Image (cartoon, rainbow, N blue to C red):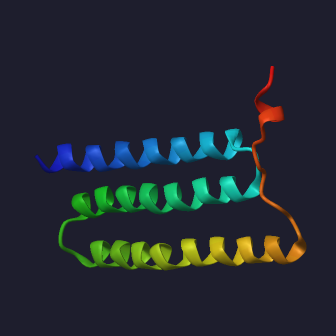
């Protein structure tokens, strides 16, 4: 049962990471790409670290994995916010879809 939970977390985290890559490639502007990368990276890495912690059991390794998760949980949104503020100060505007863009 432990192996099933581990593989579910590892595969789920990998799927979220791949979805984030697709979002980075497909989204039109830097703000959307940052949103996709920060949210998916936090959740994907969290699931992968949880799967690794399941395999490590209750040991020093699982404590280190938990500390890595806490570090990622706080730094990913903070760096994304700082980057978005820097883009606003630089004058880079978000992409806005208009009717003209939807026409064939």
Q: Nearer the viewer, residue 49 or 33?
A: 33
**Residue 88: where, in percent of width, then height?**
80, 73
Residue 81 x %, y % = 64, 75
Residue at image location 37% in from the left, 62% down from the top? 49
What x and y, as percent, mark residue 18? 53, 41
Q: Quick one: which residue is furthest to the top in this view?
A: 104
Name of the residue lying farthest toward the right = 91
Extreme-front residue of the structure:
99
Q: Residue at x 72, y 71 (%)?
A: 84
Which quadrant holds the C terminus?
Answer: top right
Q: Residue at x 68, y 53 (%)?
A: 33
Above or below, 103 against 48 in this view is: above
Q: Is residue 83 left or right of residue 50?
A: right
In this orientation, which residue lies closer to the viewer: 91 or 52? 91
- Residue 59: image quadrant is bottom left
Pinpoint residue 69: horizontal percent, then vertical percent: 41, 72
Q: How many marks?
A: 0
Tell me the residue at 34%/75% (across/down).
66
Q: Is residue 55 above or below residue 68?
A: above
Residue pushed farthest left? 1
């Amino acid at each position: 049962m432990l192996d099933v939970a581990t593989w579910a977390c590892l595969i789920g985290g990998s799927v979220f990471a791949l979805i984030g890559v697709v979002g980075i490639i497909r989204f039109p502007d830097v703000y959307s790409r940052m949103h996709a990368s920060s949210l998916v990276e936090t959740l994907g890495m969290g699931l992968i670290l949880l799967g690794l912690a399941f395999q490590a059991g209750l040991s020093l390794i699982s404590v280190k994995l938990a500390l890595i998760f806490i570090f990622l949980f706080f730094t990913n949104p903070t760096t994304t916010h700082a980057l978005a503020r820097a883009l606003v100060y630089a004058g880079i505007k978000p992409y806005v879809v208009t009717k003209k863009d939807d026409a064939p």
